Image: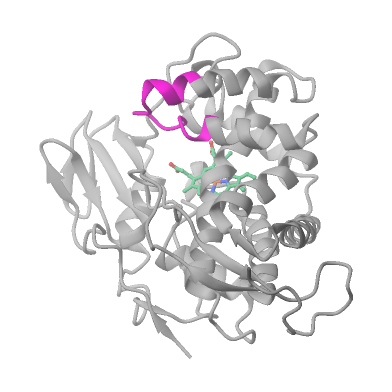
Amino acid sequence: MTVEIPPAPDTPPCGPPTFASDGGWTVTRHADVRAVLLDPACRVPVAGGGPPGTLAGLRGLVSRFSDTDRHPARRALGVAALAPLDPDDLRHEAARETSAALDRAGGRVDVTGALARRVPLRVLAARLGLADPDAAVPAVAAVAAAWHPGADRTRVVAADRAVEVLSTMAPAGTPEERANRLGLLVQACDATAGLIGSAVRHGLALPPAVSTADLLAEVLRLDPPVRGTRRVVTAATRVAGRDLAVGDPVLLRFDAANRDPVVVADPDRLRPGRPDGTLTFGAGPRGCPGTRLASALAAGVVSVLRSRCRLVHDPGDHEPHPLLRVPRRIDLAVHGPRSGDGPQTGRTVEVLR
Ligand code: HEM
């Protein structure tokens, strides 16, 4: 059984790199996006830094926005903090928290507002040793809302306050260790929420025989929560026969590349179980170090929603963001047994009010 998921209307078609004088290069083919991700001449735009305890201070210390010299050591700090985490434990814990949230929900729940950020962040914050995981959730969300360049002043002010709060909760360590631990939570926040929301949108009606892992893999490909990423050219280079000049900005479109017909047959079809070729987690030295954990957290939430909920209302829109894609709101009716009531029967025990 397959469903067609057409590209979002603003997804560029898959083709050779294009250049616009006001935006630089846009790269859309699978092989070209990979080539740029692996090209040392194309670098991540670096954040300037700022005073300790501020958004700018945090951005200036995390691997995500670090220059090529500092990046490996800072990335290693984040990877070391993630190393003890077990994907099965995260999946289990996310499922348990989701079930508990549904029990409290009183028959109806907004996935984005109540679960998609809250559950993964709470589980991750607890496992990463933050002193108050509940209070960490809104603080991380506030930082994430101003994480990428271009956030408005109000969001930056809120993020500054949130960084202060988070600084009191992170386990002891050097400023770089603490920043890169917090950075994991910020990186996880919106991307994992987007994956959960889109998996609910596209997958709630699929038969239970489709595994949640296979559903998530196809949602990551067809409706990626991270639609792309940016690079800047620091040494003249060539991509697919095009000359990229020093200073040129480059936008890599995962959403287009994931549908490259050269790599994926019948690319617009959600076909659970097909070989994984998604670029949504990036690639190379900057690729996402949280891939398995993100999938585990999302699987924990989505598997419970698939077994206990049905769709009531989905306006189909997204929170405004140039590259992240988080459904704005998805309302579900909750049925199925309360957690702790024993094996699921599929019987409706909690009627929609
Ligand atoms: C569906 C969820 C996620 C998606 C789609 C995603 C995607 C990505 C992508 C594309 C990058 C690379 C950006 C670039 O090269 O410009 C990245 C980096 C990163 N991600 Fe994720 N991510 C997700 C969840 C997570 C989670 C759960 C964590 C932590 C547990 C995490 C931690 C990070 C970190 C720390 C970086 C920066 C790596 C570095 O500086 O080298 N991500 N992510």
Give the side of residue 172 with respect to residue 237, left or right: right
- Decide whether residue 147 is among the magenta residues: yes
- Figure disc tally: 0
Q: Residue at x 16, y 43 (%)?
A: 243
Q: Does residue 170 lie above or below 310 as drawn?
A: above
Residue at 44% from the left image edge and 86% from the top image edge: 2
Residue 234 drawn at (x, y percent): 29, 29
Figure check: 346 above or below 20? below
Relative image position of residue 177 (x, y in whole percent): 69, 24
Report the residue that reaches farthest toward the left. Answer: 21
Lateral position of residue 49 relative to residue 11, left or right? right
Residue 249 in view here: yes
Q: Which residues are magenta?
A: 143-157
Quarter holding ligand 1: top right
- Magenta region includes residue 309: no
Across and down, in percent, residue 145 comes to 47, 34
Way the structure is coloured: one colour
Residue 30 appears anywhere in the view: no
- Among all residues in the image, which is located at the extreme front? 353
Q: Residue 159: x and y, percent?
A: 52, 24
Q: Residue at x 49, y 11 (%)?
A: 50
Q: Quadrant of the C terminus?
A: bottom right
> Measuring 38% from the left and 38% from the top, which residue is drawn there?
40
In this picture, is 130 found above or below 168? Answer: below
Give residue 126's quadrant in the image: top right
Please indicate whether residue 144 sits to the left or right of residue 8 in the image. right
Residue at the top extreme, as displayed: 51
Locate residue 39: give its quadrant: top left
